[in-house]
Image: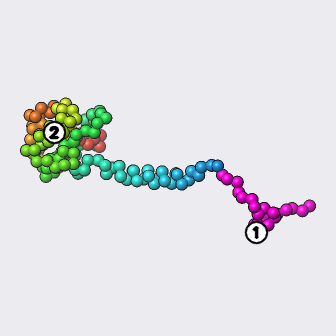
Amino acid sequence: MGMNVASSSGGGGRRGRRKPVVAEINVTPMVDVMLVLLIIFMVSAPMLTVGVPLDLPQTQAKSLENNDQKPLQMSIDINGKVFINDAEVALNELIPKLKAITDARGGLEERIYLRADKKADYGTVAKVMGQLSGAGFKKLALVTEADQGT
């Protein structure tokens, strides 16, 4: 009883034959790329929030429902500077710029989210809120952080 053993040197009469074509998708490189993309998005997503760094006060109030449109955000930092989204605005230019923005979006019915640092001057926050109210903006929401104590 003899056994035929094909040698790896190419002998045995199998010189012209190729390996059969594999018709399966190699998933490993695709998984590697997807994991790298996932990590990139996980790292970059927190950086996509509003760019004015604030230390918001904490409260136990419930959050408002979101609509499809990106909200109009105003910010007041610890130094009393006022921002519309990420652009700094002087207090005397605040209402004309806001009216120009809201006329294109929804008029005076546009909801404005006011973010103020918890160490910001209360007078500045009250002055901004008074200007908004006096100009006819009625939907003003104060942004806070959820209280972690309870």
Above or below residue 126? Residue 24 is: below
Q: Is residue 21 inside the magenta stretch?
A: yes
User: Which quadrant: the C terminus?
Assistant: top left
Task: Name the colouring of the figure.
Answer: rainbow
Percent across and percent down for residue 119 are 16, 49
Q: Is residue 111 visible?
A: no
Quick one: label 1, few (<14), some, or many (20+) residues within 10 Å? few
Q: Secondary structure at mark 2?
A: helix
Horizontal side of residue 68 vs 3, given as left or right: left
- 136 or 55: which is nearer to us? 136
Asked whether 36 falls inside the magenta stretch, the response is: no
Identify which residue is drawn at 31% across, 49% down: 48
Q: Earlier in the sequence, mark 2 or mark 1?
A: 1
Q: Is residue 148 visible?
A: yes
In this image, 33 relative to 121: left or right? right
- Label 2, label 1: how far apart the Cα atoms are: 81 Å
> The disc labelled 2 sits on which kind of residue?
Ala
In the rendered image, the residue lying farthest to the bottom is 9
Residue 46: horizontal and vertical position, in percent?
A: 33, 49
Residue identified by numbered label 1: 9
Determine which residue is flagged by label 2. Answer: 100
* Location of residue 65 by image quarter: top left
Crowd around label 2: few <14 · some 14–19 · many ≥20 (10 Å)? few
Residue 18: x and y, percent? 72, 58
Compared to residue 104, the image places residue 18 above or below, namely: below
Which stretch is magenta? 1-22
* Residue 77 shown left or right of residue 41 in the figure: left
3 versus 145 height, above or below: below
Secondary structure type for disc 1: loop
Which of the image's four quarters has the N terminus? bottom right
Residue displayed at 90% across by 62% down? 2
